Image (tube, rainbow, N blue to C red):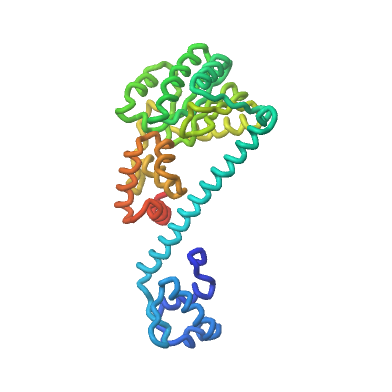
Amino acid sequence: MLQRLGLDGLTDAVYKRLIAGRYRSAHDLADHLGVTADDVRLALEHLAKLDLLRSVGDGVGELVDPRLGLKALLLRRMSGIEEQLREFEEDRAAVMSLIDEYTEARPGGGEVPGCSYVTGRDAVTDQLREMSDGAGAEWLAFLPDGSPSESWLEPLQALQRQVRAHGVETRAVTTDSIRGDARAGLRAAWEGEPGSRVRTVPSLPVHLLVVDRSRALLPADPADPWHSVLQITTPGAVEALTALFEGVWENAVPLGSAAPGVDEHGLSPREKELLRLLARGLNDDTIRRRLGVSLRTVRRIVAELCVRLGATSRFEAGYQAAKRGWI
């Protein structure tokens, strides 16, 4: 059960026996477990190295209070996971840099059929407008809210109105944060439009525009969506992105309806989603973009949740929430 925390099978069994009862010697433990006394001594040494046991004379030692020892062991593992995530991000950046260098060195820029990059704010704006003007049947969009994504929200909202005026079916999903007072003007504009089809969810992973299920637009960098976008016309990729939209739309709440209340644990949808993102190891800036709120709001909610969970770190908060069945 505790193998991932550094306890092998026998050490785990010895530790559980020590928790369950008192044993005077390694021989007593060996008799109960059906192993040799030397095997038990090695397990006891391992427990001591993990700071779960204090050596006392020639006996089996004295257990460190599991409420302290196991928690400390768990936190050390969580710290290790955080370091692995940091190293992975460094490796990812190095790999992407090499791929970019290779692509730039290839004749023709190494473009893949069915995919093309559009770079620069004006060029991206023109591409959004061109795709919307060319829509004949359907216009679907993910609109993550909040600064700095605000620059996407307003022009895309205007494009949605324009496209719908031409008789094209439009559907958009944005984040629950638009229900707040800070974005009241944009919300009211949507709610006041006849036939407006807008729904909200606690968080969105990325901006997305799909037109007529034949063309899709994604930002090359979610943190800077106006810098560069990827236009996709490959049928399989567009179909997958359309399916992603439909799945999110199905579970989203219409903007004109009341937002969902707290669950049985007293968590709002935003708090619950934030805990899920914490448990996945995402940083505050990524969480801010996905929830459509400010960095300050993310940190305030994280601090409040840590207090409620009795957690000393963001990673422990995610772990405790999962352990308690909150997420």
> Is residue 222 depicted above or below 38 in this figure?
above
For the residue pair 245 and 51, the one nearer the viewer reads as 51
> Is residue 28 depicted above or below 283 in this figure?
below
Q: Position of residue 168 (x, y in %)?
A: 53, 16
Question: Can residue 235 be seen here?
Answer: no
Residue 64 image-quadrant placement: bottom left
In the rendered structure, the answer to whether residue 248 lies left or right of residue 180 reads: right
Residue 17 image-quadrant placement: bottom left
Query: Residue sitting at 36 percent across and 44 percent down?
Result: 263
> Is residue 130 depicted above or below 282 in this figure?
above
Total count of labels: 0
Question: Can residue 100 be seen here?
Answer: yes
Query: Residue sitting at 43 percent across and 34 percent down?
Result: 201
Query: Residue sitting at 50 percent across and 19 percent down?
Result: 122
For the residue pair 285 and 100, the one nearer the viewer reads as 100
- In the current view of this chain or complex, which residue is farthest to the front? 105
Q: Position of residue 323 (x, y in %)?
A: 42, 56
In the rendered structure, the answer to whether residue 231 lies left or right of residue 60 reads: right
Q: Position of residue 170 (x, y in %)?
A: 50, 21
> Is residue 119 depicted above or below 206 in this figure?
above
